[in-house]
């Protein structure tokens, strides 16, 4: 439903009480009516909380040396704690994201961060590796909401034409989380007990919880419709004339069951969603595999210490920052494509977000080849770091373009689309670290990385194909059709 189509109804129902319901009118229009300054405060809070979850996933890799000695386990067993955390991050969005489309975004955020604090406390007090692995799994499970739902909240706040920059900032800050993890963890585990790794994360997560409670409002429009209607009834006012506002009064059980399987349906029934999610999954799996490869490369070939290895991830952070700096260019490119389309009688299409995915798909294998064939001890350590920055920029551009495309292409099911993406990414990212060290030991640092580069190269054609044929494929999408029917119903 567009805001303009319901404004006359709102005015008729609220005129008699002057300004009493002006706040309700704002809610009824949706979160996009919030002031620009407050929108950016919300984006910053959501971004930093997302970063804390992402950082929590990777910072654990810096504890291996201490935890394997204290818990008397192998590094492979310790790596299970990384994989289970990422697995939890992938499973949770399958029910957290659809629930956010039923109950709203904010309750999911508060519940997620509250539970994360509990599991961080359990990890910090672990006495054996079994307890640690359990805490890590449930930590990933509870913290995952921000990695899928927050992107949908950003989509709730901004119009499609204004979405590029906030989505870039959100995804950039979030994506820097895994790279910041080894930097922070490297210093902590070089000079203090590994338990301080989790105490630091607990403080960060607690701050995020407080900021979310006080600074982040509900943003999901259908939930705001529901709250609007309920408040009017409590004040004995006639609700707006559209019965569609009561759509949340349908059977909760049926709606929840349908919502729980929607992300999996999008993976299996939407070819574009499936292929872009697989592409993202391969990139994230490669990233987490490199968390094990970096210590091998820089400790063996360049005699780095743990905190020095952590600092090598600055290369990826620089790559991400370079990707963020290109955001104005991609926004201009999007605007240019929209102008060409509208001048020809068309509209702004979600596929106009894909050119940066195409560029990212080119940079990723380029960066991996660069990194792989500069890992030799005879070559200065800065060269593989530069290669990793090219890789980081490519992954960032691919992720940002993919997320923005999914939010734009499936606005009514944005959280479910991002949940499908998160699930696919997390499955690959959970599996890759378990065999990464073995691949690097058997193939060597150069050809092991080259193998990853060839796999990324094989995925390069898909963004190009979807940029050309995406509109035709979306025309056959059942989810696009459902959203169109839903809008027509709301406007009755």
Image (tube, helix red, strand yellow):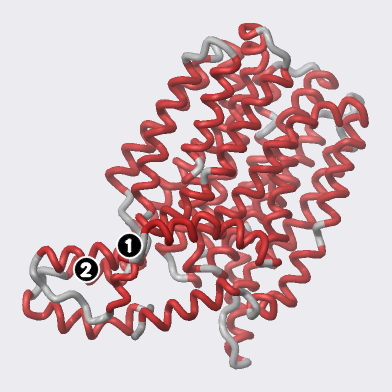
Name the quarter where the C terminus is drawn. Answer: bottom left
Give the quarter of the image for residue 444: top right
Q: Which residue is mark 1?
A: 223
Rendered view: 360 above or below 409:
above
User: What residue does disc 2 label?
Assistant: 229
Residue 323, image x and y in percent? 64, 53
10 Å neighbourhood of mark 1: few (<14), some, or many (≥20)? many
Q: Nearer the viewer, residue 41 or 350?
A: 350
Residue at image position (23%, 85%) is 8
Mark 2 and mark 1 lie on one chain; the one further toward the N terminus is 1
Q: Residues within 10 Å of mark 2 (few under 14, many from 20)?
A: some
Q: Is residue 166 visible?
A: no
- Frontmost residue, 95 versus 439: 95
Q: Quadrant of the N terminus?
A: bottom left
Q: Position of residue 104 (x, y in %)?
A: 36, 55
Q: Marks 1 and 2: in contact by CB < 8 Å? A: no
Query: Relative to residue 34, is residue 402 drawn left or right?
Result: right
Element at label 1: helix
- Residue at image coords 49%, 60%: 258
Give the side of residue 55 with respect to residue 451, left or right.
left
Measured from the top left, where is residue 453 in percent x and y? 85, 46
Query: Which type of secondary structure does the marked residue at label 2 adopt?
Result: helix
Q: Give the residue drawn at x 23%, y 66%.
A: 228
């Amino acid at each position: 439903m567009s805001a303009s189509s319901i404004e006359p109804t709102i005015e008729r129902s609220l005129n008699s009480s002057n300004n009493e319901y002006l706040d309700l009118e704002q809610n009824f229009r949706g979160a996009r009516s919030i002031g620009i300054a407050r929108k950016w405060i919300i984006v910053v809070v959501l971004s930093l909380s997302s970063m804390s979850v992402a950082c929590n996933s990777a910072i654990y890799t810096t504890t291996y040396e201490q935890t394997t000695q204290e818990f008397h386990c192998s590094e492979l067993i310790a790596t299970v704690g990384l994989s289970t955390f990422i697995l939890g991050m992938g499973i949770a969005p399958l029910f957290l994201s659809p629930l956010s489309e039923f109950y709203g975004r904010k309750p999911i955020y508060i519940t997620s961060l509250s539970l994360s604090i509990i599991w961080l406390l359990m990890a910090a007090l672990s006495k054996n590796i079994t307890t640690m692995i359990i805490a890590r799994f449930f930590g990933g499970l509870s913290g995952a909401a921000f990695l899928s739902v927050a992107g949908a909240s950003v989509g709730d706040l901004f119009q499609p034409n204004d979405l590029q920059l906030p989505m870039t900032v959100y995804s950039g800050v979030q994506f820097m989380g895994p790279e910041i993890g080894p930097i922070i963890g490297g210093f902590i585990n070089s000079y203090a007990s590994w338990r301080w790794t989790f105490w630091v994360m607990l403080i960060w997560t607690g701050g995020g919880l407080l900021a979310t409670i006080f600074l982040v409002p509900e943003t999901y429009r259908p939930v705001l419709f529901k709250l609007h209607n309920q408040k009017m009834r409590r004040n004995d006012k006639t609700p707006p004339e559209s019965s569609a506002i009561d759509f949340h009064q349908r059977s909760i059980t049926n709606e929840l069951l349908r919502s729980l399987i929607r992300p999996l349906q999008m993976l299996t029934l939407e070819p574009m969603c499936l292929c872009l999610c697989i592409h993202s999954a391969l990139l994230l799996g490669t990233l987490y595999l490199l968390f094990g490869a970096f210590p091998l490369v820089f400790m063996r070939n360049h005699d780095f210490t743990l905190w020095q290895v952590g600092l090598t991830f600055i290369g990826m952070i620089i790559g991400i920052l370079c990707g963020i700096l290109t955001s104005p260019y991609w926004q201009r490119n999007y605007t240019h494509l929209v102008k060409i389309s509208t001048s020809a009688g068309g509209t702004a299409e979600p596929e106009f977000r894909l050119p940066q995915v195409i560029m990212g798909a080119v940079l990723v294998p380029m960066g991996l080849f660069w990194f792989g064939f500069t890992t030799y001890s005879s070559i200065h350590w800065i060269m593989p770091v530069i290669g990793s920055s090219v890789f980081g920029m490519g992954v960032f551009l691919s992720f940002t373009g993919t997320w923005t495309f999914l939010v734009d292409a499936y606005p009514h099911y944005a959280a479910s689309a991002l949940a499908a993406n998160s699930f696919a990414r997390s499955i690959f990212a959970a599996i890759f670290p378990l065999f990464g060290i073995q691949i690097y030991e058997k193939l060597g640092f150069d050809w092991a990385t080259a193998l990853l580069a060839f796999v990324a190269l094989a995925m390069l054609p898909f963004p190009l194909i979807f940029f050309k044929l995406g509109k035709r494929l979306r025309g056959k999408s059942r989810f696009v059709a459902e959203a169109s029917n839903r809008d027509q119903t709301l406007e009755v």
